[in-house]
Image: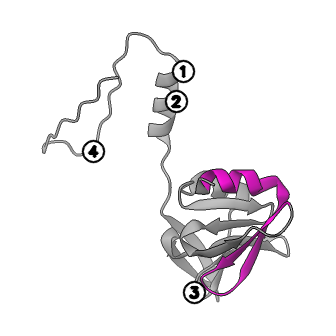
Protein backbone atom coordinates (compact mmCIF):
# COMPACT_ATOMS: atom_id res chain seq x y z
CA UNK A 1 0.00 0.00 0.00
CA UNK A 2 1.40 3.38 -1.01
CA UNK A 3 0.86 6.25 1.43
CA UNK A 4 1.32 9.91 0.49
CA UNK A 5 0.91 13.06 2.56
CA UNK A 6 0.46 16.40 0.83
CA UNK A 7 0.58 19.66 2.74
CA UNK A 8 -1.72 22.38 1.38
CA UNK A 9 -1.86 25.59 3.46
CA UNK A 10 -4.99 26.67 1.55
CA UNK A 11 -7.12 23.85 2.98
CA UNK A 12 -9.56 24.70 5.76
CA UNK A 13 -10.07 21.08 6.81
CA UNK A 14 -7.99 17.92 6.54
CA UNK A 15 -9.08 15.75 3.64
CA UNK A 16 -8.32 12.05 3.24
CA UNK A 17 -8.74 10.39 -0.15
CA UNK A 18 -8.43 6.63 -0.52
CA UNK A 19 -7.76 5.49 -4.09
CA UNK A 20 -7.89 1.79 -4.78
CA UNK A 21 -8.46 -0.69 -7.57
CA UNK A 22 -11.25 -2.39 -5.63
CA UNK A 23 -12.74 -2.23 -2.14
CA UNK A 24 -11.59 -5.16 -0.06
CA UNK A 25 -11.51 -5.95 3.66
CA UNK A 26 -8.25 -4.02 4.19
CA UNK A 27 -9.71 -0.86 2.59
CA UNK A 28 -12.92 -1.14 4.61
CA UNK A 29 -10.91 -1.50 7.82
CA UNK A 30 -8.80 1.53 6.91
CA UNK A 31 -11.87 3.66 6.17
CA UNK A 32 -13.49 2.54 9.42
CA UNK A 33 -10.38 3.53 11.41
CA UNK A 34 -10.28 6.92 9.70
CA UNK A 35 -13.94 7.55 10.53
CA UNK A 36 -13.47 6.98 14.27
CA UNK A 37 -13.37 10.30 16.07
CA UNK A 38 -12.48 9.80 19.70
CA UNK A 39 -13.87 12.55 21.86
CA UNK A 40 -11.43 14.23 24.21
CA UNK A 41 -14.06 16.01 26.30
CA UNK A 42 -17.07 14.84 28.27
CA UNK A 43 -19.79 16.89 29.95
CA UNK A 44 -20.17 16.22 33.68
CA UNK A 45 -22.45 17.67 36.32
CA UNK A 46 -21.35 18.62 39.83
CA UNK A 47 -23.28 20.75 42.30
CA UNK A 48 -25.84 21.82 39.67
CA UNK A 49 -23.11 23.07 37.33
CA UNK A 50 -22.03 21.65 34.01
CA UNK A 51 -18.30 21.03 33.80
CA UNK A 52 -16.41 20.32 30.61
CA UNK A 53 -14.02 17.50 31.48
CA UNK A 54 -10.92 16.61 29.51
CA UNK A 55 -10.79 12.81 29.33
CA UNK A 56 -7.05 12.82 30.09
CA UNK A 57 -7.92 14.03 33.63
CA UNK A 58 -10.52 11.34 34.26
CA UNK A 59 -9.33 8.41 36.38
CA UNK A 60 -12.35 6.21 35.76
CA UNK A 61 -15.99 6.05 34.78
CA UNK A 62 -18.21 3.91 36.98
CA UNK A 63 -21.83 3.20 37.83
CA UNK A 64 -23.36 3.73 41.24
CA UNK A 65 -27.09 3.55 42.02
CA UNK A 66 -27.86 3.17 38.31
CA UNK A 67 -26.06 6.44 37.43
CA UNK A 68 -22.75 6.92 35.63
CA UNK A 69 -19.99 9.00 37.21
CA UNK A 70 -16.58 10.24 36.12
CA UNK A 71 -13.92 10.45 38.81
CA UNK A 72 -11.04 12.91 38.71
CA UNK A 73 -8.51 13.81 41.40
CA UNK A 74 -10.70 16.79 42.33
CA UNK A 75 -14.28 15.48 42.35
CA UNK A 76 -16.79 13.05 40.89
CA UNK A 77 -19.17 14.15 38.14
CA UNK A 78 -22.51 12.80 37.01
CA UNK A 79 -22.35 11.80 33.34
CA UNK A 80 -25.48 11.62 31.21
CA UNK A 81 -24.17 8.84 29.00
CA UNK A 82 -24.27 5.09 29.56
CA UNK A 83 -21.01 3.18 29.91
CA UNK A 84 -21.41 1.52 26.52
CA UNK A 85 -21.82 4.96 24.92
CA UNK A 86 -18.69 6.20 26.67
CA UNK A 87 -16.80 3.09 25.58
CA UNK A 88 -17.64 3.88 21.94
CA UNK A 89 -16.57 7.52 22.29
CA UNK A 90 -13.37 7.12 24.31
CA UNK A 91 -9.89 6.45 22.97
CA UNK A 92 -9.44 2.67 23.28
CA UNK A 93 -5.68 3.16 23.66
CA UNK A 94 -6.31 5.25 26.79
CA UNK A 95 -9.41 3.68 28.36
CA UNK A 96 -10.30 0.03 28.96
CA UNK A 97 -13.51 -1.54 30.18
CA UNK A 98 -12.71 -3.68 33.23
CA UNK A 99 -16.22 -4.74 34.27
CA UNK A 100 -19.88 -4.17 33.47
CA UNK A 101 -19.77 -1.18 35.80
CA UNK A 102 -16.36 0.42 35.22
CA UNK A 103 -14.03 1.89 32.59
CA UNK A 104 -10.51 2.85 33.69
CA UNK A 105 -7.97 5.31 32.28
CA UNK A 106 -4.79 3.29 31.65
CA UNK A 107 -2.64 6.31 32.53
CA UNK A 108 -3.93 6.18 36.13
CA UNK A 109 -3.06 2.53 36.79
CA UNK A 110 -0.20 2.30 39.27
CA UNK A 111 0.16 -1.49 39.23
CA UNK A 112 -1.77 -4.69 38.61
CA UNK A 113 -1.94 -7.60 41.04
CA UNK A 114 -2.08 -10.83 39.03
CA UNK A 115 -2.26 -13.11 42.08
CA UNK A 116 -6.06 -13.18 42.11
CA UNK A 117 -7.37 -16.32 40.40
CA UNK A 118 -9.27 -15.46 37.23
CA UNK A 119 -9.35 -11.72 37.81
CA UNK A 120 -7.07 -8.70 38.21
CA UNK A 121 -6.76 -6.09 40.93
CA UNK A 122 -5.76 -2.70 39.55
CA UNK A 123 -4.24 -0.25 42.01
CA UNK A 124 -4.92 3.27 40.79
CA UNK A 125 -2.60 6.23 41.34
CA UNK A 126 -5.15 7.85 43.67
CA UNK A 127 -4.82 4.86 46.04
CA UNK A 128 -8.09 3.14 45.16
CA UNK A 129 -8.39 -0.43 43.90
CA UNK A 130 -10.48 -1.53 40.94
CA UNK A 131 -11.27 -5.16 40.21
CA UNK A 132 -11.54 -6.51 36.70
CA UNK A 133 -14.19 -9.13 36.15
CA UNK A 134 -13.22 -12.45 34.55
CA UNK A 135 -15.09 -11.50 31.40
CA UNK A 136 -12.76 -8.56 30.68
CA UNK A 137 -9.38 -9.99 31.81
CA UNK A 138 -8.31 -11.17 28.34
CA UNK A 139 -9.25 -7.81 26.78
CA UNK A 140 -7.24 -5.93 29.42
CA UNK A 141 -4.22 -8.19 28.90
CA UNK A 142 -4.49 -7.66 25.15
CA UNK A 143 -4.58 -3.85 25.53
CA UNK A 144 -1.58 -3.97 27.89
CA UNK A 145 0.31 -6.45 25.69
CA UNK A 146 0.65 -9.16 28.36
Residue that label 1 marks: 25
The residue furthest front is 115
Q: Nearer the viewer, mark 4 or mark 2?
A: 2
Ranked by sequence position, the earlier of labels 3 and 2 is 2
Residue that label 2 marks: 29
**In the picture shown, does residue 97 fall above or below 60?**
above
How far apart in space, not on screen, are marks 3 and 2 (Cα)?
37 Å
Q: Residue at x 57, y 86 (%)?
A: 73
Sort mark 3 into few (<14), some (14-19) or many (20+) by Cα contacts within 10 Å: few
Picture quadrant where residue 20 is located: top left
Q: Which mark is residue 40?
A: none
Q: How many marks?
A: 4
Residue that label 4 marks: 13
How far apart in space, not on screen, are marks 1 and 2 (Cα)?
6 Å
Residue 44 place in picture, x, y as percent: 60, 75
Element type at mark 1: helix
Ranked by sequence position, the earlier of labels 4 and 3 is 4
Q: Nearer the viewer, mark 1 or mark 4?
A: 1
Residue 30 place in picture, x, y as percent: 46, 31
Q: Are marks 1 and 4 in contact (CB under 8 Å)?
A: no
Residue that label 3 marks: 73
* Magenta stretch, residue numbers: 118-143
Q: Is residue 82 visible?
A: no
Ranked by sequence position, the earlier of labels 3 and 1 is 1
Q: Residue at x 22, y 46 (%)?
A: 12
Q: Are marks 3 and 1 in contact (CB under 8 Å)?
A: no
Picture quadrant where residue 59 is located: bottom right
Sort mark 1 into few (<14), some (14-19) or many (20+) by Cα contacts within 10 Å: few
Ranked by sequence position, the earlier of labels 1 and 4 is 4
Element type at mark 3: loop
Q: Is residue 125 visible?
A: yes
Amino acid sequence: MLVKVEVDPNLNETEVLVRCKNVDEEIMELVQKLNITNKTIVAGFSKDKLQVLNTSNIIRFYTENQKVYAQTNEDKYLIRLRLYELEERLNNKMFVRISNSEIVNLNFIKNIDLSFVGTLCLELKNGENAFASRRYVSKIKEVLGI
